[in-house]
Image (cartoon, rainbow, N blue to C red):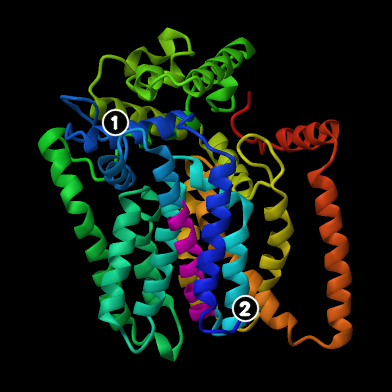
Amino acid sequence: MLESRHFPLVIFLIALCVRVVYVLLFPALPYNIDAAEYVILGQNLADGEGFCYQPGHPTAYRLPFYPLLLALIFSLFGNDAFTAVAILECFIGALTAFAMYYTAALFIKRSRPAAIVALIVALYPPLIKLTFKFMTENVFALLVVLSVFFMYRALTDPPSKAAAVLAGVAIGMSLLTRPTLGPLVVILPVWALLARGQHWGKPKAKLVRVSLIMGIAVLCMVPWIVRNAITMKAFIPFDTHGGATIWYQHNSLSPDGYFWSALPKDKLVEIRNRIEDQRARLDSGEPLEEVMLPTVLKGPMAGFEFLPKEKIAKFTGLTEKERDQAFWRDAIRTILTHPFRYTKKTIKEVIKFWHVFDDNGRFVASYVFLMPFALIGLILALLKGRWSENALYLSPLLCAWLLGATINASYRFRLPFEPLVFTYVGVFCGRFSRFSSRARAVVIIGGSVYAALVFCLFLYPESLREAVQAITNKLGFTAYPVY
């Protein structure tokens, strides 16, 4: 069954069915402020008002690819067609599992382990939950998998120009969704110079193919850059959101430089109460624009308005581009002023990227269960001497890890890259099938005990959860947000 040529279709249908069931059982609305921003942009695009939150006021605060997808749905089914958006997200999630089968098969070179990887992606609870978030992560996960597949295919001899073009398109679309894969412009040429192995070809040939890939990716971004130059009167290659994000992480508000640490408890409660009130109003049927637009129009100042006015005065009264630049300047100045603190925070974020809690402090049992097997699989792959293959395959994950360590090592920023990590569960399973019967028995018994422990931790009492959270907080690995 796992080796049937029809199994990828079976994977697609399984992934689609579980996601459709999920969105039907747990309907949702754009409760999150980020989600509301994307939806409002999509609605205005569908209405012909352009890329804006308010007609006549163009913005580049968010990247365009996901709002354009939403606009397509809203133009076909109406601006309140949130269920139609969810169904589209179900198909995108199912395509991720489908594409993951071929990506894992290309890397592992065996169909059975690849089928296991695809099945994990199809049934992985955190990925299923992405289908009704109105956020970029679900689409971005598919683009990451496609980028890896075509990139891997394009850079393996015999060279494939078609794969190189498709890799560039996938990377370009990902950069128009989230800027996370931006470091590939440096990582891929370095890889091309250092990669060893006859099937990769000569360094010059690899550099030519890498240049083609990144050139196509940049071409995909040109319309967005030109649009920003015309409507925003500025060179904006990505968005105007990055400055606020890095300032949120590196500022002079508190001794540790974290935004949340600068807010007194009563302000955190006020933020939580505002979020709960907005959710209740949306559930009661109030229009999204009436509930969320006032907060959306404040941009990053919606969160920072809870700070003392003198702390944010220098960011008020500026244009969108000027404000973004001001945030970048202040964040970089703070980093240079506190190099030891920056180094310490970065080391913590490097580790925190692999946090076992989600951004709301919930224990992610499925992730915790799979990670040890993925780590063993990675070690087994490296022991086979496949350093160049692994470096290329994991290069998008390295981009996310680097940016997470510097800007924000959030759980949801890691989630789109977890399918690549689970490839190594397939590597482990492939090697497991070759173990002796005694070794298999040991692994099965040990794995069963381990699964039982993880299950017990998933159900552990609230007091134990708080104790575990307190320990991680003391070590500096706090799950966001802190309220």
Q: What's the CA distance linking mark 1 and mark 2?
A: 47 Å
Q: Which mark is residue 448?
A: none
* Disc 1 element: helix
**Residue at 33% across, 43% down:** 70
The quadrant of the picture occupied by the N terminus is bottom right
The residue sitting at 45% across, 32% down in the picture is 30
User: Residue at label 2?
Assistant: 113
Residue 393 vs residue 452, the one in the foreground: 452
In the image, what residue type sits under mark 1?
Answer: Gln
Question: Does residue 142 appear to the left or right of 265 in the view shown?
Answer: left
At a point 30% along the width and 82% down the height, the residue shown is 160
Q: Is residue 43 left or right of residue 131?
A: left
Q: Report which residue position mark 1 lands on.
A: 325
Bounds of the magenta span? 90-107
Residues 28 and 21: in front is 21
> Does residue 230 show up magenta in the picture?
no
Q: Can the viewer see residue 250 in this picture? A: no
Disc 2 residue type?
Answer: Pro
Main SS type for the magenta part?
A: helix
Structural crowding at the residue carrying mark 1, measured as other residues with C-alpha within 10 Å and reported as few (<14), some (14–19) or many (≥20): some
User: Dot 2: what SS?
Assistant: helix
Image-quadrant location for residue 149: bottom left
**Residue 120, percent from left and from top:** 62, 64
